[in-house]
Amino acid sequence: MNYTNTNLHKELAGRNFTNHIAENVYPGRGIVIGRNHENSWIVIYWIMGRSSNSRNRIFRNENGILRTEAANPSLVEDPTLIIYNAMRDVDNRIVVSNGSQTDTICEGLMQGESFCTSLHTEKHEPDAPNYTPRISGFIELKESSMALAKISKSDFSAEHSEHHYYRYCKIPPGYGYCLTTYMGDGNPLPSFHGDPIMLPLEGDAEQIADIYWQGLNTDNRISLAARELGKSGKDRLKIVNRFQ
C-alpha cells in the first residue's frame, strides 16, 4: 500500500514528540498504539507522578497482565486510582488503559460487547479539581485495527462526562497515535484536549521503550512498558521502572 506525504508525516510525528513528550514537564499517563518499522503492533503505556503516593509505583507483568503495584506497600496512602490492571488480552484483542476500566473493557468483550459500548458507563476520574480523563486503547488483531478512547469531564458539569472514540485502520509502519491525560503541568492539571496525536515508532520494543523513557521528564517519570506483537507470533514486553 502506498502512503502519501510520508516525509511530512515524519516531520509532524517528530515535532509532536518534541512538543508533547520531550519538552513537556507533565503529560501525565500516556498510551501510544501503532506500528513499528517491521509493521509489528506496538503498545506503549507510561505513568508519571507528582505526589509521593503517585510516585510510589512500579509495573509488574504476571500471568500475561501488566499491572501497577506499590514500590513500597508501607507508604501507600490511597490505592484507589493508582493500583490497577493496565494491559490485558482477551482472545486476539489487546486492551490498555490508565485505570480500572481495563477490567471493565475486558469483561465487556467477554460478554459480547464492543470496545466502545463497554465504556458507556465509565466516567472521568473523581479527583477534583483535576478531573483526570480516562484514556483507553484497543487492538483487534484479527481485523488489523486499533481504537483509542478518551472520557473527559463535561464542559457543563463535573458530574457528567464526554466520551470520544477514535478508530484507525492501515496504520503505516513507523507511526502511532497517542493520548495522554494532561497537556502539561499546572494546578489544576490541564486535561488533554483535541484528537490523538501522531508520534514516531522507530525500532523494536526495547529501543522504543528507551526512546520514550528518555523523552519523558526525568523528575516525573515513574514507569513505562512497551509491547511488540509481530505477525510471526513474536510478543515482547519491555518494562522500565524508576523505583526498582
Image (spheres, helix red, strand yellow):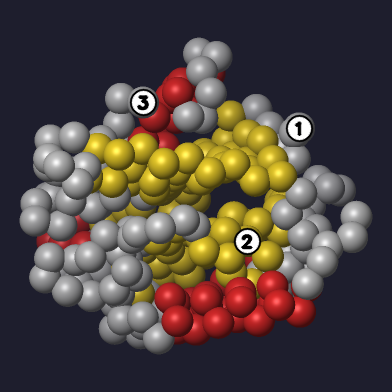
Residue shown at the point (41%, 41%) measured from the top left: 164
Relative horizontal placement of residue 4, taking residue 63 as reference (left or right): right
Visible in this render: residue 242?
Answer: yes
Residue shown at the point (76%, 79%) measured from the top left: 7
Q: Residue under circle 3? A: 120
The residue carrying pointer 1 sits among few (fewer than 14), some (14 to 19) or many (20 or more) residues within 10 Å by Cα, namely few
Is label 2 in a helix, a strand or a loop?
A: strand
Q: Residue 207: image x %, image y %?
A: 66, 76
User: Where is the C terminus found, in terms of image quarters?
Assistant: bottom left
Q: Amino acid at mark 2?
A: Gly
The disc, 3 or 2, on the residue closer to the chain's N-terminal end is: 3
Residue shown at the point (39%, 46%) measured from the top left: 150
Q: Residue 165: image x %, image y %?
A: 48, 40
Residue 104 position by quadrant = top left
Q: Residue under circle 2? A: 176
The disc, 1 or 3, on the residue closer to the chain's N-terminal end is: 3
Residue shown at the point (65%, 46%) measured from the top left: 168
User: Where is the N terminus found, in terms of image quarters?
Assistant: bottom right
Q: Residue furthest right?
A: 1
Q: Is residue 98 above or below residue 179?
A: above
Q: Residue furthest top?
A: 111
Measured Cα–Cα span from mark 1 to mark 3: 24 Å
Measured Cα–Cα span from mark 3 to mark 2: 25 Å
Is label 1 in a helix, a strand or a loop?
A: loop
Contact, CB < 8 Å: mark 1 with mark 2? no
Q: Is residue 171 above or below residue 141?
A: below
Residue placed most toward the observer, 155 or 18: 155
Q: Which mark is residue 142?
A: 1
User: Closer to us: mark 1 or mark 2?
Assistant: 2
